[in-house]
Image (cartoon, rainbow, N blue to C red):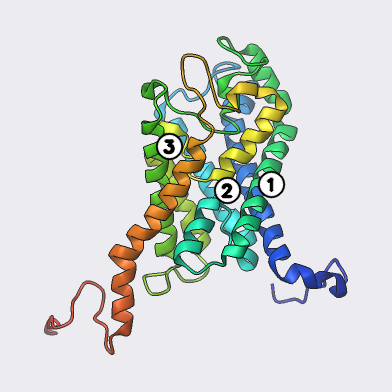
Amino acid sequence: MAVDIPPLIKPSHLRRRGGLWGECLAEFLGTLVIVAFGDGVVAMAVAALPGSDRTEGPTTFFLGAGDWLLIGWGWAFAVAFAVYVAGGVSGAHLNPAVTLAFALRRGFPWAKVAPYWLSQLVGAFAGAALVYAVYHDAINTFDQASQGPKTNGHTLASFSIFATFPAPYFHGGVWGPLVDQIVGTAFLLLLILAIVDARNTAPKGNLGPLLIGLAVGAIGLSYGANAGYAINPARDFGPRLFAYAAGWGDLALPGSLAGSFSHYWWIPIVGPFVGGVVGALVYDLLVGDVLHLRAQQTAPPPPGRTRGTPAPEEE
């Protein structure tokens, strides 16, 4: 907007928000937006649509594989709009794995890492609380109508609104979900670095946030069923803490369901941290180093050609 927007707070009180404090507020709000829309779309699919007679029954959801598109697109929009919200202030990391990778490979100050992480975690917790405040009637109705194992009256399906767990075909194993989280987050960081790299084919016209959201959607559509594609320690652990406080008990922490999985809580934390670093290293090794070398050349060749390759003759 071209108009001059006066601040809500007196300028004398705004000065400390011009630095790290303001960046942390932006990370908090941006992560809240991610979870509010991301967990919100899962609440719609799992509890609100069935409970409002928009599906075949009060506990009927995901009748076909295509129904997963609702979740995939919802999270894509959530991330895109969150990056638009926070990007101008904090850079919109909104993910502890992104913050760690940027500290290791993009010169992000290590002194800011812990404050960013805390802001992201609190924002994710607040986003989950907001979703519960809006949808608790639908969630409780769904749980009451559902059959099968329950923890404090809550089902695994309603827990999926807030945090992730592994698919049954892993049979409670650790390595399958852990590798899934490493691979998914590696792709996330690789794609983010490619999108924001001005040396590469970076998008113009402020399209970066939209493309980052589409990257998250692509990961969800391709890898989401294995373990819910957390690919973000704050996005999983913040809502997990809220779910524990709201009554989901062992399903949330330590992340256990008898006969299915046990002590799962750490996998969506460790996996994304490892995967984020791997993705950054892979991008820099295979693409970033080449771009750096070409930037040092007096006349770098165009994409797809190497120095010394003659240009095709014009007809």
Q: Residue at x 59, y 45 (%)?
A: 234
77 lies above or below 165: below
Label 1, secondary structure: give it: helix
- Callout 3 amino acid: Gly
Residues packed near mark 1 inside 10 Å, few (<14), some (14 to 19) or many (20 plus): many
The tag earlier along the polypeptide, 1 or 3, is: 1
For disc 3, the marked residue is 224
- Callout 2 amino acid: Ala
285 lies above or below 213: below
Marks 1 and 2, how far apart in space? 17 Å
The tag earlier along the polypeptide, 3 or 2, is: 2
Left or right of 233 on screen, residue 186? left
Which quadrant would residue 183 be assigned to in this image?
Answer: top left
Which residue of the protein is positioned furthest toward the bottom in this rendering? 298
Q: Which mark is residue 24?
A: none
Pair 1/2: label in front: 1
Task: Pinpoint residue 188: horizontal percent, then vertical percent.
Answer: 43, 52
Quadrant that contains the N terminus: bottom right
- Callout 1 amino acid: Val
Marks 3 and 2, how far apart in space? 16 Å
Which residue of the protein is positioned furthest toward the front in this rendering? 111
Q: Residue at x 57, y 9 (%)?
A: 147
Q: Is residue 53 visible?
A: no
Label 2, secondary structure: give it: helix
The tag earlier along the polypeptide, 1 or 2, is: 2
Which quadrant would residue 288 be assigned to in this image?
Answer: bottom left
For disc 2, the marked residue is 78
Quadrant that contains the C terminus: bottom left
Residues packed near mark 2 inside 10 Å, few (<14), some (14 to 19) or many (20 plus): many
Left or right of 166 on screen, residue 144? right
For disc 1, the marked residue is 122
